[in-house]
Image (cartoon, rainbow, N blue to C red):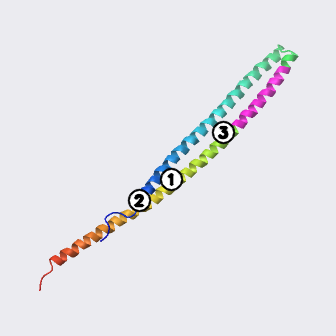
Amino acid sequence: MRSKKYPLDPLVRVRRERVDASVRDLATSIQAREAAERMRLEAEAERARRAEEAERSRASEAVALERGELTAADLQRLGAWDARTQWDDQARGEQVTAALGQEKLARDGEGRARSNVATAEGEAKVVTEHRGRWVADAERAAEAAAEEQASEVWRPRR
């Protein structure tokens, strides 16, 4: 007679645990991607804010220059300031590029985590379906055995 306990119960448990672990990894990956995306957006916003601020300053300096309110020393400081803002903008551009790189790495990690979840769920599904077939086979065998016993009990005597 067949054992009433499913022989692959440990495998079922391991596969379920693997699904749970991969889902937790996916959640962590999503959080990392969201954090990287926020950092990129903040870097882009800071760069845009600073560029707008510099443009407003340049515009006010141009107006003052047109009115003749600036001296040669002011123009020299303006040139130095302009060079500095360009360097700062370049540095912020590099920060944005680095943030984009981090975001790409995080997106790739999230994709791998999603793939791992799908794989783990597929493996768990295979064992679950096998268990269902095993239970159905056991029930059919028990029913057949019961019918066999019943037919022997009610067999006419000669």
Q: Three-letter amino acid code at disc 2?
A: Pro
Q: Secondary structure at mark 1?
A: helix
The residue located at (25%, 73%) in the rendering is: 145
Reading the image, the residue beneath label 3 is 99
Region of the chain picked out in magenta, as a range: 76-95
Q: Which badge, 2 or 3, comes first in the chain's sequence?
A: 2
Q: Position of residue 85 (x, y in %)?
A: 77, 27
Q: Is residue 129 magenta?
A: no
Q: Secondary structure at mark 2?
A: helix
**Quarter of the figure with residue 96:** top right
Mark on residue 10? 2
Relative to 100, residue 9 above or below = below
Q: Is residue 10 left or right of residue 39?
A: left
Q: What secondary structure predominates along the stretch shown in magenta?
A: helix
Real-space Cα distance between discs 2 and 3? 44 Å
Q: Position of residue 153 (x, y in %)?
A: 16, 76
Q: Is residue 79 magenta?
A: yes
Real-space Cα distance between discs 1 and 3? 27 Å
Total count of labels? 3
Reading the image, the residue beneath label 1 is 117
